[in-house]
Image (cartoon, rainbow, N blue to C red):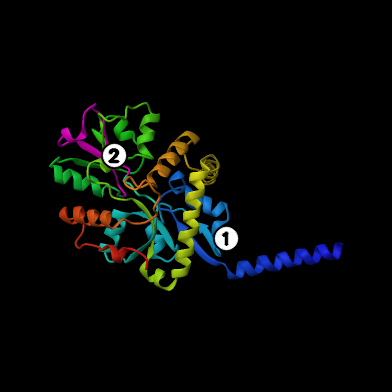
Amino acid sequence: MKNGFIRALTCLLLLAGAWTAQAQKFIFTPQWTAQAQFAGYYVAYEQGFYREAGLDVEIVHPSLSKTALRRISDNESQATTLQLCQALEIIDSGVPLVNILQTSMNNSLVIVSRKDEDPLLQKGMRVGTWSIGFDQMAICMSLKEGLDYQWIPFNSGLNLFLSGAIDATLAMSYNEANQLLEAGFKVSDSNTYRFCEHGYNVQEDGVYMTRQYYESHKEQARKFAEASRRGWEWAVEHPDETLEIVMDYVTRNHIATNRVMQKLMLEEILRLLVDRESGQREYRLRPDMVKLANSLMLENQLLLRGVPYDELIAR
């Protein structure tokens, strides 16, 4: 009996060692700190979907000294998440990227005004925007509508807006919009402009890697994308358990947030997975949205050249 147990344990250890030797190391860096925005990847890791795909995945969040893009450029991470407009700008700057998985099917960007008035009726107002970007569609809309907004950069938080130092702020429907509600500020149809409802519904988050890395690791990229998609599907079916996983990551990474905020973020992120037209979670870049993003950004001189759909997607 004892010898049988020892033989079985030895076999298990040998199998574990063999898996470790064969598993492909893959470091994934989301574009921001730990939060429900990246729930599907946390789920895929914790539920063992990456391991089942033969990948030894490590999730490493960015820091002030090492952004996600810097980690990718330095070959310290193999993939990151980017909004489509960000990816176009980076490719236009000379860094070829490939989209291996698209999660967001809708644009989450909004402008919230301090006045109970449509932001489109307030020309020249001071609008808060993130110093690290995400404002491409806002710039295009402002120029196209002749609004002459003054863009006031902020690092994080909504103190400028809540203190009255600015007239309006950009916000993500899954993040800052909920923070404003939690702070007691009114966010309604009367003072909020939703880009997805006004001809600017450009997809946001997807998973990207450098084309150079992709060309020599196509199978690894495919496995990571498929396992990540499993993670997102599991999150849709198990939102309560997913929230627990998110809170564990938030706690471990010392993020100043709370369960209510992360629950609201998770609900909105999962809603954004569903395409507004098909009603399905498609996990793909839409050619028409790539075309729209290119058109708007070229028209407003945010790109020097167009980035065709075929240049973006993994083949």
Residue 257 in sight in this render: no
Examine the image and state in which quarter residue 308 appears.
Answer: bottom left
Q: Residue 293 location, x and y as percent? A: 24, 54
Amino acid type of disc 1?
Arg
Q: Is residue 111 magenta?
A: yes
Quarter occupied by residue 67: bottom left
Gap in angstroms between the C-alphas marked 2 and 1 = 38 Å
Q: Residue at 37% across / 56% down in the picture?
A: 284
Across and down, in percent, residue 303 comes to: 21, 58
Numbered badge on residue 110: 2
Above or below, 299 against 10 in this view is above
First to last magenta residue range: 108-132
SS label for mark 2: strand
Label 1 sits on residue: 51
Q: Please, which residue is most extreme toward the front here?
A: 278
Residue at 48% from the left image edge and 45% from the top image edge: 236
- Pointer 2 local density, CA inside 10 Å: few below 14, some 14–19, many at least 20: many
